[in-house]
Image: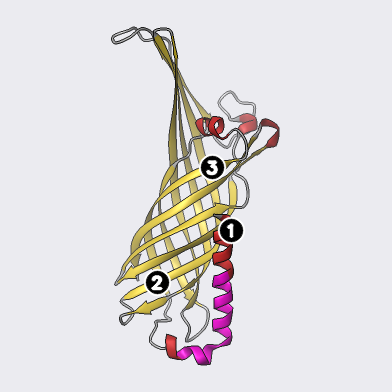
Amino acid sequence: MKRVILLSITLLLFVSGAMAQEQTSSNTFFKDMSTRDYNRIHLGFSPMNIRWQDNADANFKLCPLSKSVSVGYLHGSNLVESLPLYIEYGASFQYSFGMSNDEKKYGSGTNYNVNTVKMYSFNVPVNISLRLGFKNNKIGIFPYAGLNMRYNVAGNIEKFKGAVIGNGFGAMGGSHTTTYKLFDSSDDKYAMGEKALNRFQLGINAGVGFTFGKFYVGAGYTADVTKIANNARREYVGSLGVVNISVGLSF
């Protein structure tokens, strides 16, 4: 996936550079396309996962991020007069979550270990985009590539441990829930300690969006370059990957 993203960025930058150098010859193709700035508000749903370097199954159970929802704003500013080449920048608020359930049976009973994770983040994307308009610009295609900066404001992991003794209507064994602060590396009882996650990640964006009138739909992928977890001594190293699916309004 990283190779696909890097190739997409290389191709987009190459095309952008060629377009900027060949404005006169390109005017015939682009003459009817809009070069006005644009704005977009969007809602997103994003399957996501941490790509663990080691002990992937065990680490996922400990920090089971699997999906997120987001809301954001983006502005497209024209870079070259008479060409539909833009720089896009904006911000979005993202709520990420996930759950893992580990059951272990013993005799006539079952132990339950349930981890629930929640994370709150701000994203700031900066992309280079083409705005290809068709049908008198009523239909638009927006291939893009660039960078994403994510700052994780807060988060926690809630760990439930319990047991059911016997079958059917068996008695409930002892159980308790403990909540740990996801980004706290202190020695506090309710902190993640050495396994605390990093607050800032830099990632690479690539994708494509479509407009139909003012309605927008898009899909892309963000691969983090910096680690969200980087404790090699504890074999707890991983980077976040996010599939971006969004709908919104462009104006």
Report the mark closest to the observer, 1 or 3. Answer: 1
Amino acid type, residue under disc 3 in the picture: Ile
In the displayed structure, does residue 2 sit left or right of residue 99? right
* CA–CA distance in space, label 1 to label 3: 18 Å
Residue 203 placement: quadrant: bottom right
Question: Seen in the image, is 84 located left or right of residue 150?
Answer: left
Please give the name of the residue rendered at 34% of the width and 7% of the height, measured from the top-left corner: 171
Residue 58 appears at what percent x and percent y? Answer: 55, 29
Q: Mark 2 or mark 1, which has the lower sequence index?
A: 1
Residue pointed to by mark 1: 3
Q: Check the image and report above or below for 23 versus 10.
A: below
- Is 24 magenta? The answer is yes
Q: Which residue is mark 3?
A: 50
215 vs 51, left or right, is left
SS of the residue under disc 3: strand
Above or below residue 1? Residue 31 is below
Residue at 49% across, 71% down: 129
Q: Position of residue 122 (x, y in %)?
A: 50, 51
| Of 166 and 87, the residue lying toward us | 166
* Up/down of 151 relative to 197, above or below: below
> In which quarter of the view is residue 194 placed?
top right
Compare marks 1 and 3 and give the one earlier in the sequence: 1
| Direction from residue 186 to residue 32 in the image, left or right | left
Residue that label 2 marks: 141
Pointer 1: residues within 10 angstroms few (<14), some, or many (20+)? few
Amino acid type of the residue tagged 2 in the rendering = Ile
**Magenta-drawn segment:** 11-27
